Image (tube, rainbow, N blue to C red):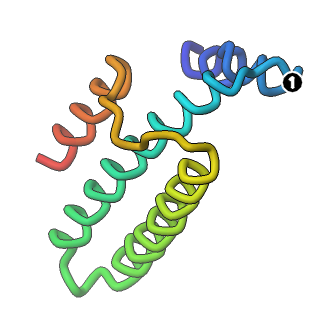
Amino acid sequence: ALWNRASSSHNFLTFAADSTLTAAQFNTWLVQDAIFAAHFRAFLSTLLSRTPPSLSDDLALLRSGLAAMDAELATFADWGAKRGVAMGAAPLPAMGRYEKALEELAG
């Protein structure tokens, strides 16, 4: 229930849907999502390194996930450059919790 509410009624989504999202709000999202994507890519890399060769379908899925994250990170970098956004900002508290959760999952 909480996830459904958070993923469909967050202010960011509402503002994006009704075209009231400010440039500053978009830039904050851009930086924070890039941070998440980088950490998720590291998480996928860890999983890939621990996946036995006998699980070839899983290896292929993880490799495709890594490729997708590489493309997403390149897109974030391009958007950041076009918008003059410093992409090295510190993570916000919520992002820090996501990072910690990924680190715990990776072990």
Whole-percent x, y for residue 10 in the image: 65, 16
Whole-percent x, y for residue 48 in the image: 25, 71
Residue 98 is drawn in which quadrant?
top left
Q: State the residue position of label 1.
A: 19
- Residue lying furthest left: 107
Whole-percent x, y for residue 6 in the image: 60, 17
- Residue lying furthest right: 18
Mark 1 residue element: loop
Quadrant of the frame with the N terminus: top right
Residue at 18%, 79% in the rendered image? 52
Residue at 15%, 69% in the rendered image? 50
Residue at 33%, 28% in the rendered image? 91
Above-or-below relation of 61 to 103: below
Above-or-below relation of 44 to 95: below
Residue at 32%, 17% in the rendered image? 93
The answer to whether 55 appears left or right of 71 in the picture is left
